[in-house]
Image (tube, grey):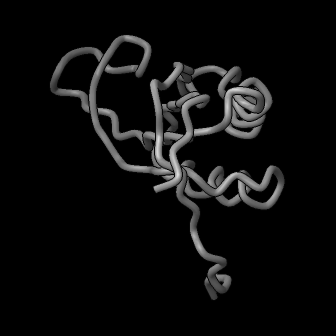
Amino acid sequence: MDQNINSKLITSFLPHGTGVPIIKLLKQETGICTANINSSRGTGSSAGASDFDDWVEVDVLDVVVNADRADEIFSFIYEKAGIGEGNHGFMLQQSLVGSTKFSLPDLPEEE
């Protein structure tokens, strides 16, 4: 097992449907292919919901990177996802005690 003890976790809460394009851009433009995405739903005043009956679905994007690239990749996601443009998401970054390296194989383009 290839373990990395100097890594950061970047978590982004993005508008539903925007996570997969960000993952593709990460691989194409930065070479990062260690990302996970899932859909979640929740509520809150910043999400435009007035009460718990108004659920908002989001894509949750998690990216593990070496600490020396964390700020670069954080800024990349921030820019490409339009986080600073109104209610386009929220991001956070944290240190990890350790992580196991993995990578995805090159897959053919979807038609």
Horizontally, residue 37 falls left or right of residue 53, namely right
Task: Describe residue 20's horizontal placement relative to residue 38 as left or right.
Answer: right
Rendered view: 82 above or below 23? above
Residue found at the far right of this picture: 29
Count numbered badges in the picture.
Answer: 0
Residue drawn at 41 percent across, 21 percent down: 47
The x, y position of residue 46, in whole percent, is 43, 14
Question: In the image, is residue 25 above or below residue 90?
Answer: below
Quarter of the view holding residue 107: bottom right
Q: Nearer the viewer, residue 43 or 105?
A: 105
Image point (55%, 32%), residue name? 5
Q: Residue furthest top?
A: 45
Residue 78 spot, x, y in % from top left? 70, 29
Q: Is residue 34 left or right of residue 99?
A: right
**In front: 94, or 76?**
94
Res. 73 image quadrant: top right
Residue 111 image position (x, y, % from top left): 63, 88
Furthest residue toward front: 1
Taking depth in this image into account, of 92 and 87 the one nearest to the observer is 92
**Residue displayed at 53% across by 22% down:** 90
Q: Residue furthest left?
A: 53
Going 38% across and 49% down the picture, which residue do you hit?
A: 38
Q: Quadrant of residue 20?
A: bottom right
From the viewer's side, name the closer residue of 88 and 100. Answer: 100
